Image: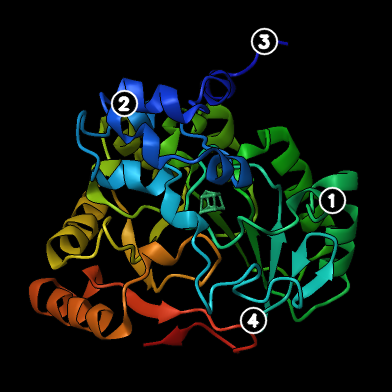
Amino acid sequence: MQPRRWQQAWREAVRDPRELLVLLGLEALAARVPAEAAAQFPLRVPRGFVARMRRGDPADPLLRQVLPLDEELLPVPGFGLDAVGDAAARAAAGVIRKYRGRALLVATGSCAVHCRYCFRRHFPYAEETAAAAGWRGAVDAIAADPAIDEVILSGGDPLSLATPKLAELTAALARRAPHLRRLRLHTRLPVVLPERVDAELAGWLATVPWPVAVVVHTNHANEFDPAVDAAMARLRAAGATLLNQAVLLRGVNDSADALAALSERGFAAGVLPYYLHQLDRVAGAAHFEVDDARALALHAALRERLSGYLVPKLVREVAGDASKRPL
Ligand code: SF4
């Protein structure tokens, strides 16, 4: 069978930091890209996302999200391997129960882009995916608990699975879990690889029997372009509600201008701001952290500048809490 267009684009992603630097005219940065950081969590970035980076700018906010740098290797107290308590919240293979009424499926370990700040960069994905064994353990766990009314597909990136695989899950859930009311997907694919939102995906979304929320994870207005706008339009046409969850990242979006532009640009594409997360304190990501006082000041500035519906909630995830914790 021919690979789908998005799968082809996925395979052609840049994986070699030196190639990325050459494409951007930033060869001089190579000395700051240690092989060890790239080996711990390999670089991966689709070429369409690279095309949205500014050539010759080492501070480009999209580049900073994906380029392994020497800062990652500095051990920093308080930054660990399982920053949000995923290991303790595991309910079945690939199923995480943290919050009332919701089950999160680590659908797959794969992502189209590797984000340097990712709190799951050390999580043992390969052993923990819900899609293994035809979703059996995950569907059993959800079917057995009528208190679960929302299933959250996360990862990795759930849209890295082929659409028929996703359809297999929702068909099994529709059959065996009549108590479900909502489906939520957390994904970066519509932004980093908009080709993923093809007719097959839209067809699947349009036919699932619950309202669907798609939470796209974008951190900077420059991540949007006409192809992304078109992908968002296709998701909305399929009936999905689009929300954005960003992470507050030093050197990427830690200014009122950048955050306001992100909300406004997202809304122009039909995406409502949802959360602005304080960074999860994962080893290797300390250089992205913004302290709480500054985060609160930025959030106050956003409230002054934007209509209320364009201001995301500023939160942090604390392992063991019953919900995200507002700052
Ligand atoms: S796409 Fe999401 S899960 Fe994957 S590396 Fe980026 S932040 Fe992590």
The answer to whether marks 1 and 2 mark residues whose Cβ atoms lie closer than 8 Å is: no
Measure the C-alpha gap from mark 1 to mark 2. Answer: 44 Å
Task: Point out the image quarter for the N terminus.
Answer: top right
Q: Who comes first in sequence, dot 2 or dot 3? A: 3
Measure the C-alpha gap from mark 1 to mark 4. Answer: 21 Å
Q: In front here: 283 or 224? A: 283
The residue sitting at 53% across, 79% down in the picture is: 78
The residue sitting at 35% across, 27% down in the picture is: 21
Which residue is identified by label 4?
99
Q: In front here: 121 or 52? A: 121
Q: Amino acid at mark 1?
A: Trp
Q: Who comes first in sequence, dot 1 or dot 4? A: 4
Residue 182 spot, x, y in % from top left = 61, 65
Q: Who comes first in sequence, dot 4 or dot 2? A: 2
Crowding at label 4, few (<14), some or many (≥20) Cα neighbours within 10 Å? some
Which residue is identified by label 3?
2
Residue 47 spot, x, y in % from top left = 41, 25
